[in-house]
């Protein structure tokens, strides 16, 4: 098979397009002929070496990629509910590597059939894993209730853009987004189901007396601290990333008990392996939101040989939506 290999931790030019042996599925796994592989910010952080000392995460040389779409090539021992030739998409709990290739192996529990869904594979790999993540974050962690108001930072990002549609399906009364000021015009033209999108540098002043029950923060930095000022009593902030790159930022924790607030972290890649039974229900909820047109993510495709370019675009913050690679 052909694969884009990270040969060392470092800048995007560490990628090398390589021929590798086709992987075979083990017990409880499936092999997939990949048609589309999603590129995520977590892939960039792993390649940069931010988590190189964390146990269980890949060391070079490795093939990155958490999420793929394609057709089932082979079934491992004990796999039921999937068949060879079936179109599928994988969720983010399947591991931290292997997707940037023409053949990938995934846990069957994290693999979802697309047959009859009406969702094409490029949109599926771009939207289903993130929408399933949003569903789990909002239901299992933030416990969003019908009638509540949601604030989503980095509103156009690959993960963030899945939240407004899923929040709508769960009965949210309103969803507000924030983006960097240069992206405001693009945000206002977006089909994403936000009630409004504000500039992130002064959103706390712009919202006035309005308060939010759930804040979704994949950005971090000062946006995280400013969010505490606009949270309703018993409000919950979901930390789902750190796109700002501000790894030293701290929040004033005394604000939490004084305001009856909660800050909750959620990383689906660490959650689903311990709760595999939640994967397919979350994927079904994601597919329903996508079918209803509530997750209209802009999908950009690049050939596998341009994996380094995809990573550079993400590092530059120039991607609205998601990039997928085609082997």
Image (cartoon, rainbow, N blue to C red):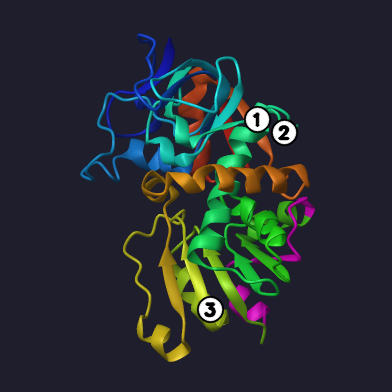
Q: Is residue 157 shown above or below 219?
A: above
- C-alpha distance separating marks 1 and 2: 5 Å
Examine the rendered structure and indicate whether residue 271 appears above or below residue 260: above
Give how far across and how far down residue 302 sits, in percent: 59, 24
Left or right of 74, for residue 58: left
The image position of residue 290, as x and y in percent, is 71, 44
Q: Can you identify the residue that label 3 sits on?
A: 235
In primary-sequence order, the first of circles 1 and 3 is 1
Q: Which residue is mark 1?
A: 114
Please tell me which residue lies in front, 206 or 170.
Answer: 170
What is the C-alpha distance between the residues marked 2 and 3?
A: 35 Å
Q: Which residues are magenta?
A: 189-208
Image height of 25 relative to 252, above or below: above
Ranked by sequence position, the earlier of labels 2 and 3 is 2
Find disc 2 in the rendering and name its residue: 117
- Is residue 198 part of the magenta span, yes or no? yes
Secondary structure of the residue carrying numbered label 1: loop
Give the crowd class for mark 3: few <14, some 14-19, many >=20 residues within 10 Å: many
């Amino acid at each position: 098979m052909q694969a884009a290999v990270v040969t060392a931790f470092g800048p995007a030019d560490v990628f090398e397009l390589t021929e590798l042996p086709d992987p075979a599925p083990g017990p409880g796994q499936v092999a997939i002929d990949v048609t589309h592989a999603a590129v995520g910010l977590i892939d960039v952080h792993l390649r940069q070496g931010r988590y190189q000392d964390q146990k269980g995460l890949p060391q070079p040389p490795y093939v990155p990629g958490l999420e793929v779409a394609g057709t089932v090539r082979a079934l491992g021992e004990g796999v039921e509910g999937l068949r060879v030739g079936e179109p599928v998409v994988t969720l983010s709990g399947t591991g931290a590597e292997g997707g940037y290739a023409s053949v990938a192996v995934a846990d069957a529990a994290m693999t979802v059939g697309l047959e009859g869904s009406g969702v094409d594979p490029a949109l599926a790999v771009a939207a289903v894993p993130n929408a399933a993540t949003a569903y789990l974050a909002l239901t299992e962690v933030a416990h969003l209730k019908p009638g509540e108001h949601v604030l989503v930072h980095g509103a156009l990002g690959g993960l963030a853009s899945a939240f407004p549609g899923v929040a709508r399906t769960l009965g949210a009364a309103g969803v507000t987004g924030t983006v960097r000021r240069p992206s405001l015009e693009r945000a206002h033209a977006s089909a994403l189901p936000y009630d409004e999108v504000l500039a992130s540098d002064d959103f706390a002043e712009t919202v006035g007396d309005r308060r939010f029950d759930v804040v979704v923060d994949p950005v971090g930095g000062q946006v995280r601290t400013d969010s505490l000022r606009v949270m309703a009593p018993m409000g919950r902030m979901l930390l789902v990333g750190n796109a700002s790159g501000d790894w030293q930022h701290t929040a004033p924790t005394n604000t939490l008990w004084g305001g009856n607030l909660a800050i909750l972290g959620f990383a689906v890649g660490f959650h689903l392996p311990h709760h595999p039974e939640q994967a397919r229900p979350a994927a079904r909820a994601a597919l329903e939101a996508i079918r209803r047109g509530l997750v209209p993510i802009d999908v950009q495709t690049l050939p596998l040989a341009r994996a380094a370019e995809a990573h550079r675009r993400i590092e530059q913050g120039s991607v609205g939506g998601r990039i997928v690679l085609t082997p």
